[in-house]
Image (cartoon, rainbow, N blue to C red):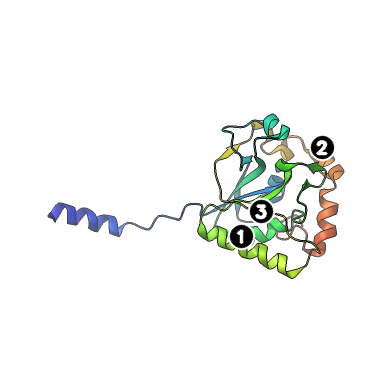
Amino acid sequence: MTRLLILVLTLVAALPARAADGDGVLIVAGGCFWCVESDFDHVPGVIETVSGYTGGHLDNPTYEQVSHGGTGHLEAVRIRFDPAKTSYAKLVEIFWRTIDPTDAGGQFCDRGHSYTTAIFPLNAEQKRIAEASKNKLDESGKLGAPIATKIIDAGPFYPAEGYHQDFYTKSPIRYRFYRFNCGRDNRVDQLWGTEARMGLEYH
């Protein structure tokens, strides 16, 4: 082995370890992505939320294609967070308490595959955490029905059209009207009681 090669290997070994893929990112589907964005933007430690589509077989799907069905995608949100201020495990626990995990047909007034719920782990550790959390919730019988939320290995995530991003701040009246009429908060409160929307600053 040449001196140069030894030097290069020594320098590489001295470099800090690269963070595991997915560190600081949670991807979830919780029905209408406007609502998931709104909920998680209020969680301490969350840096950014992006509405999008994932879990399907069509590249660069549009909202119309996903809503029409047949692409396999779910409305989802990619959540970037600061691991020094919160954790993947904590955000998964908060996620459960912002949705109806027992509903296999959609969420609240939004029905169909694209509105079903899922967690999309980006690595083995995230998958372990998500599965353990789901199993614990299921075994507790707390919600009185099996947990329907799926855990699916993450694939391509396609950001939604610009008008969907931060919709709750761009069109607050329309957003509040939609959320109220969809019955989202009433159902979450009914299911979770005092734990509903646990961890959100406004709760």
* Residue picked out by circle 2: 173
Front residue of 32 and 134: 134
Name the kind of residue labelled 1 in the image: Ala
* Residue picked out by circle 1: 130
Q: Position of residue 83 (x, y in %)?
A: 54, 58
Instruction: Locate residue 196 relative to residue 42 in the image: left or right.
Output: right
Callout 2 crowding tier (Cα within 10 Å): few <14, some 14–19, many ≥20 = few
User: What whole-number distance in Å separates the C-alpha atoms at marks 1 and 2?
Assistant: 34 Å
Outermost residue, front side: 70
Q: Position of residue 172 (x, y in %)?
A: 78, 38
Q: Residue at x 52, y 60 (%)?
A: 125
> For residue 35, what is the image quadrant?
top right
Q: Secondary structure at mark 1?
A: helix
Nearer to us of marks 3 and 1 is: 3
Q: Along the polypeptide, which appears first: circle 3 or circle 2?
A: 3
Q: Position of residue 189 (x, y in %)?
A: 83, 57
User: What whole-number distance in Å separates the C-alpha atoms at marks 3 and 2?
Assistant: 32 Å
Q: Along the polypeptide, which appears first: circle 3 or circle 1?
A: 1
Callout 1 crowding tier (Cα within 10 Å): few <14, some 14–19, many ≥20 = many
Mark sitting on residue 150: 3
Q: Position of residue 20 (x, y in %)?
A: 45, 55
